[in-house]
Image (cartoon, rainbow, N blue to C red):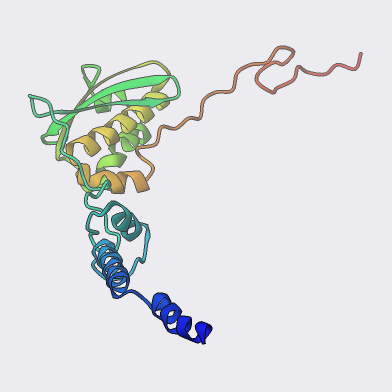
Amino acid sequence: MAEDEKTPEATDSEATDPTDAGTEAAASEAVADTAASDAPAGGTITDLADLGAAVSGTPSTGGGAPVVDPLAPTEPKIDAQGRAYATGKRKDAVARVWIRPGSGKFTINNRTDDVYFARPVLRMVINQPFAAVAREKQYDVVCTVKGGGLSGQAGAVRHGISQAIAHFEPSLRTTLKRGGFLTRDARVVERKKYGKAKARRSFQFSKR
């Protein structure tokens, strides 16, 4: 009988305390509210941007779209005289180029283009950037170039004009880049080696 009398008391002590149950329910609701507040606007984490927003607590822009487009055109780089400046290089030639809106006049080392670059192919080379972006006869070009030969100097002027156009009208940079006008051509003459007549040319062989 003594054991039977203790059984109801043990049963009552093992029963769940209503205060503890209420505390656990409140904690569960708090965890759910925190998860809901950290979740992105769509309700699910679909990419790294949503995951970062959930961890940091900042709202996601939705779909992982960047706030600022790094590829957006920048402001034009124009000096006080309304010119855009750039430096062009090719082989051993270096050209300093200024462009401004005009009628398409070229001044190269204080001479016109048809005098300095007498060969038509060289004048075609320096006009290629304007033709690629449909800006022929719309800019005046003033440049100084030194080093190398006429072919290298024409390539340096072309490179400088391309860079200057990209500075004056940043929206044209993509077109110039796709055409390869903004890339510095790294091809140069290979150096001469000792024991060789030139870079790879051997001396004439004589059997006797």
Q: Nearer the viewer, residue 149 or 24?
A: 24
x and y, in percent, of residue 3 in the image: 52, 83
Task: Reply above or below: 59 against 12.
Answer: above
Specify whether residue 106 is in view: no
Q: Using the image as rendered, state which of residue 46 and residue 66 is in the foreground.
A: 46
Q: Position of residue 184 (x, y in %)?
A: 41, 32
Residue 77 falls in image quadrant: top left
Q: Is residue 123 above or below residue 72?
A: above
- Residue visible at 51% across and 83% down in the picture: 2
Residue sitting farthest toward the front: 1
Q: Position of residue 202 (x, y in %)?
A: 74, 20
Residue at the image point whose x is 12% and y is 26% from the top: 79
Residue at 37% of width from left, 76% of height from top?
16
Question: Residue 149's spot in the image, x, y percent?
Answer: 42, 20
Question: Does any portion of residue 88 appear in the rendered image?
Answer: yes
Query: In the rendered view of the protein, which quadrant contains the C terminus?
Result: top right
As displayed, is residue 162 above or below residue 90?
A: below
